[in-house]
Image (cartoon, coloured by chain):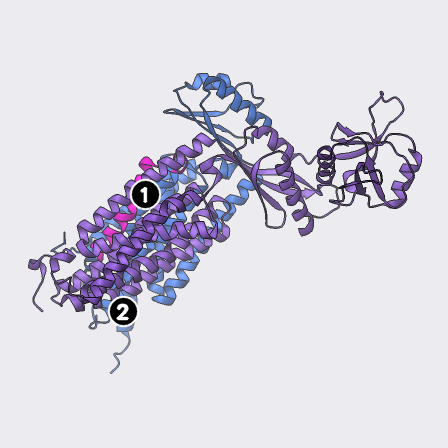
Chain colours: A blue, B purple
Amino acid sequence: MRFKKELDYVHLSKYFYIFSITLTILGIIFLAVLNLNYSVDFKAGSNVDVSLSKNLTVDQIRTAVANIGTDHEPDITPGTQRVTIRYDKELTSQQDAALKSAITKLDDKASFEVNTVDTEMAKELARNAIYAVLISCLGIIVYVSIRFEWRFAIAAIVALIHDAFMVVAVFSIFRLEVDLTFIVAVLTIIGYSINDTIVIFDRIRENLRFGKQKTYDDLKNLVNKSVSQTIMRSLYTAFTVFIAAFFLLVLGGESIKMFSLAMVIGLLFGAYSSIFIASPLWLLLKKNQKLKSKSKPAKA
Amino acid sequence: MKRLLSFIITVLVLAAVMAVSTPGLLDRVRLGLDLKGGFEILYQAQPSEQGQEVTRASLLQTAASLEKRANVLGTSEPEVTTEGTDRIRLKIAGVTNEAEVREKMKEPAVLTFRSAAPGDAEGTYSKVELVGSDFVENAATVGRDNLNQIEISIKVKDKQKFAEITKRLLGQHLAIYLDETKLSDPFVRAELTDGTASISGNYTIEEARNLADTINLGALPLKLTEKYSQSVGATLGKQSLDQTIKAGLIGSVFILIFMIGMYRVPGLIASFALILHTWLLILVFVVADFTLTLPGIAAFILGIGMAVDANIITNERIREEMRSGKSIMSSVKAGSKSSFRTVMDSNITTIIVAAVMFAYGTGSVKGFALVLIVEILLSIFTNLYFARWLLNMLVKAGKLSKPKQFGVKESEISAL
């Protein structure tokens, strides 16, 4: 498998920019209107996951848990041999025990996972998550600036913020639940999706050393050449991690489903952005530098 | 010939070591509560009386008391750690009466010494004379008196106050209550002026010890509130473990097939390096006694996909050199050299993010970040250095002389 013909990635990227910008705007609108579907990790309360040995209806469960001593109705989401019950307020340990015994009466093989987070802790988790994302980005900017130059750093950071934001947008649009593992997934994507970008940037830097690029076309050809030289590598490396994330999503434990889904989405955007967003963006930044130096009198 | 021999010996010895040790290693991996069932609570500690502060010493004291309390309740291997300046994390596995344990843990029982007030029924006492914090922390000890009877001695902080109380209550009962439960109601036999009280009676050594423990626990210096809790049923934990491991195995097999199908001999070497990498990771977990959580396993599996990045980048580069017409020997040399920097750069950025996650994360997030960091470091060793070393040995031994062995078709090679 090899691309015999060199594609004009820079030219193609115009359409992908439009695609990404549209998706970003859509994401911002959805975030502004609907926000994210936060789990108890970020908005306090209790989340009860029950694994059942038989299928129970929502009504059966609602009736069973009606008398555990909470003053509000829980949110009940059924699944196959599985049900998620969510309370906006934290369950006390008595209520927790009452709920478990009520459901055990319906199904004596039921197994529970209960997560309870209090308001203050939820705020703290959310704050730490934001700090972690910001500091990670900063760390990458610093590292890439040291190893490459600032233009690469900016292009790389735009690409990875794009990847992270796309995952957030998709989760907002499809109302998927955002919990602590989601943040872990976003951070992992930030750390990983830059790998493909670095592979291409490394090649651009290497190719820059051969010969002088005098015109914009020279630079554009250089980017196209670098992308096509590395595209199989990028696709393969993204593919192997994708396989891992995909099987986690399809076969892995229920409580890391959202994590795996976020990883899968992030990986796809990561591979895409390193080819169609990062490299053309670097070209854009570099072009301006070239034009500036052109206006000065040429040195001997 | 010598090179080929050392290649074969290396591979065989490592394969044998892995095959023999793996079952034992797997048994010794410590599993997190989300995989084996149990519960975890994060407490915030506050001073039990207003105006006091949470000190490092009182936090440690409280953690120690919690652990003791968990032990007294008959739980297996409770794990109590302090976090930050005012937090305590408690992990208990395999508890059947979770609600009861949680209740006992959360509510720091109030220990009081009481005397009978006018109007109290026979055997009940309502006038509080001393509270838990009046006693020196952890002061209750079990011993024997002159008559070889079991006695519990406790120390109070304020000698004079105690002297006054014992003088007033001489010949009467001074009962010990934990919350509203009467534990014991010993007689005051003498005015006690040295600040040490002895409780003796018809106790068995077991009872006396329990009472002493309770008195010590009652002197819990801080009040605890639950900030976060997670409880996972044993069945659900096992289910998560089985499903996720299965996902990992299938995913890994696909990755190995992909590598071998794509890169032939170097792909085989990469697969071997990957298996070594996984084995080493398990070894690190056992030796360092890390706990493996569900997100940890997820990191483990993702890491397998990431580790082969090094091999893909190197092998693609080697193939590129070969296609340009270079000899296999110099292609391997040039390919390894120029891909090294790229591999390091991309690994370091992932480590940066994992380190931030480790610093800002709590509980399972830390677990995930830790696995990721260890995994990347190991993969630099196995999938970069070790795989390259194996490949070089084969190439120098002359066993890799056909482009086909690298997955390169002759027709793709252009003349130099």
Task: Please tell me in which quadrant of the rendered image residue B251 appears.
Answer: top left
Disc 1 on helix, strand or loop? helix
User: Mark 1 highlights which residue?
Assistant: A245
Question: Is A60 situated above or below B416?
Answer: above
Q: Is residue B146 left or right of residue B101?
A: right
Pair 1/2: label in front: 1
Label 1 CA crowd tier, 10 Å (few <14, some 14–19, many 20+): many
Does residue A255 show up magenta in the picture?
Answer: yes
Task: Please tell me in which quadrant of the rendered image residue B219 appears.
Answer: top right
User: Mark 2 highlights which residue?
Assistant: A290
Q: Mark 1 belongs to which amino acid?
A: Ala
Q: Kindly identify which chain the residue marked by label 1 belongs to.
A: A
Q: Residue at image x 49%, y 21%?
A: A104
| Same-subunit check for callouts 1 and 2 | yes
Q: Position of residue B312 (x, y in %)?
A: 24, 56
Task: Please tell me in which quadrant of the rendered image residue B265 appears.
Answer: bottom left
Label 2 CA crowd tier, 10 Å (few <14, some 14–19, many 20+): some
Q: Which residues are magenta?
A: A230-256
